[in-house]
Image (tube, grey):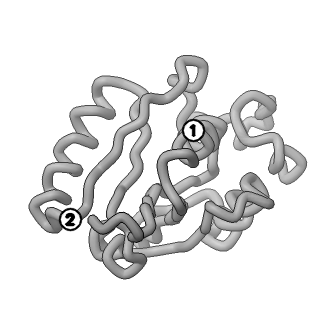
Amino acid sequence: MSQDKKKIAVFPGSFDPITVGHESIILRALPLFDQIIVAVGVNSTKSSMFSVELRKQFIRKTFEGIEKIKVMEFSGLTVDFCKQQNASFILRGLRTSADFEFERSIGQVNKILDEGIETVFMLTSTKHTPITSSVVRDIIRHHGNLEKLIPKAILDQF
């Protein structure tokens, strides 16, 4: 990689909705990259609580004013999206050892598909380990307190 090439990372996910765990990983990764593309995956076979547009809006509001963060949607293979965006890195957060095993195999397959794209793993902060979008959706359905689960910037949306 040449010295003048921008270090662009793609952080792919469904973000249905974005959680404080996602927010923490992205903010902690900012010093490592010139740009982070938060890529909202579109999966027509999966039903979502929030539309892709609303999920992107939540993410944009969460990171408002941070120019190094870009929000986009994508479908298909993450490595193909990375190539389209000139990204050399895939950023992934790890909560548990089960996450590691799952993400490791995906990262290895991505490396087979494109040797020029590295997967970078970041450990979730301990306090965020139990927080998943699935758990947050369940709490939303039951009108529970989201204060410590989703970014403060979007709390007023719920």
As drawn, 130 above or below 37: above
Q: Position of residue 70 (x, y in %)?
A: 61, 67
Earlier-in-chain disc, 1 versus 2: 1
Q: Amino acid at mark 1?
A: Arg
Q: Nearer the viewer, residue 117 or 142?
A: 117
Q: Position of residue 20 (x, y in %)?
A: 66, 37
Report crowding for label 2: few under 14, some 14 to 19, many 20 or more residues within 10 A (C-alpha): some
Residue 146 vertical placement versus 109 (above, below): above
Inspect the image, locate mark 2, and give the three-letter code of the amino acid beneath it. Gly
Q: Which residue is mark 2?
A: 116
Q: Is residue 101 visible?
A: yes
Number of numbered tags placed on the structure image: 2
The residue shown at (43%, 39%) is: 93
Secondary element at tag 2: loop
Residue at the extreme front of the image, as rendered: 3
Mark 1 → mark 2, Cα distance in angstroms: 23 Å
Residue 28 numbered tag = 1
| Residue 10 versus residue 94 in the image, above or below | below
Q: Are marks 1 and 2 in contact (CB under 8 Å)?
A: no
The image position of residue 19, as x and y in percent, is 63, 41
Question: Residue 98 at what x, y percent from top left?
Answer: 29, 28
Name the residue at 35% across, 71% down.
82
